[in-house]
Image (tube, helix red, strand yellow):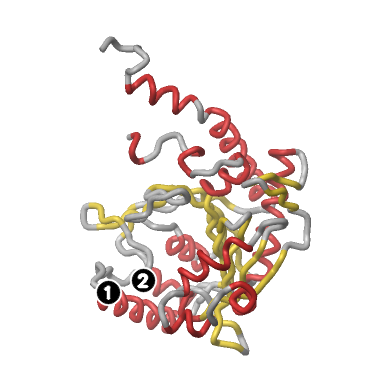
Amino acid sequence: MSPGSKSDPYLREETRLAGRKRNLRLRAQMVQSIRTFFVDQDYLEVETPQLISAPAPEMHIEAIGADGRYLHPSPELCMKRLLAAGLSRIFQISRCFRKGERGDLHLPEFTLLEWYRTGIDYQTLMEECEALIRFLAKRLTGGEMISYRGRDIDLRGPWERISVRVAFDRYASLTLERALSQGCFDQALVEEIEPHLGNTRPTCLYDYPAPLAALARLKPGNTTVAERFEIYLAGVEIANGFSELNDPNEQRARFEAERRQRAAAGKEGYPLPERFLQSLEDMPEAAGIALGVDRLAMVFCDASHIDQVVSFTPEET
């Protein structure tokens, strides 16, 4: 077979990659606009190491080992250490890595936008996330309406805000308590609740059960829930944020509980991130959020699969 023939697999790959040009241009404009938004809001862009000594030992996140260390699943721990060191508004657009994540919405190597701000809680952070998405829509589309998955989504406020408990009462076939006791919370959320969220306007799903928020502050007056929220557009979760836990003793106890759960499930045990735990003694009240850049690009590109908004998939490298 001569190079360049129609059956040449490399030619077919080049054609496939060339078909992403429009999406890659739009993605680049989106990333540039993200930076503009945060610089205008007096945020400092930071870079933290991708290779770390210990990840947060969360039950459902698998880190990738690398020469005795770990590729970070998120820049969260290092960014909070910067808050403890005195920085007050920081953001980062970072490559992150998680073992075993692959699907229409998942990649093992992906891009996260994370930002943290001292002196606020998760309610203010929800408002800031709304402002960011509206800003990006105006820059990329010229308005505050977007079309995704065949739906017209109005980004103007107010966005829908619904608690996890109300969402279970309204959409799920079982109670929140039963979902937690039977270990099927995630399944019920994905299959029964998420399809109803963010279909005409974005949805903030908030106040997660305390056991499902390893690094979030518990809600004053109701410690059965944590001050955590997720943002949904047309049933797709694009962001996860919360008021930050800054009690080192409570955080250590939560990490130890997560390690026990991981051990019981036969999962890899991670060392405790001791430098992070020590830094919490100096970390002020703050809120932070992780937003999936790839997923947000899917929304603005009206793409059905995450493969359509990245230069190369794992299978193409």
Q: Residue at x 43, y 79 (%)?
A: 251
Answer with left or right where residue 122 lies relative to residue 7: right
Tally of numbered discs: 2
How crowded pointer 2 is (Cα within 10 Å; few <14, some 14-19, many 20+) is rated as some
Amino acid under disc 2: Met
Q: How far apart are marks 2 and 1 (CA)?
A: 9 Å
Quadrant housing the N terminus: top left
Looking at the image, is mark 2 or mark 1 nearer the viewer?
1
Q: Is residue 87 visible?
A: no
Which of the pair 143/175 is nearer the observer?
175
Identify residue for label 2: 59
Most extreme residue toward the top is: 2
Amino acid under disc 1: Ala
Q: Is residue 178 visible?
A: yes
Give percent across and percent down for residue 33.
64, 42
Answer with left or right where residue 261 lies relative to residue 226: left
Q: Dots 2 and 1: beta carbons under 8 Å?
A: yes
Q: Residue at x 47, y 74 (%)?
A: 185
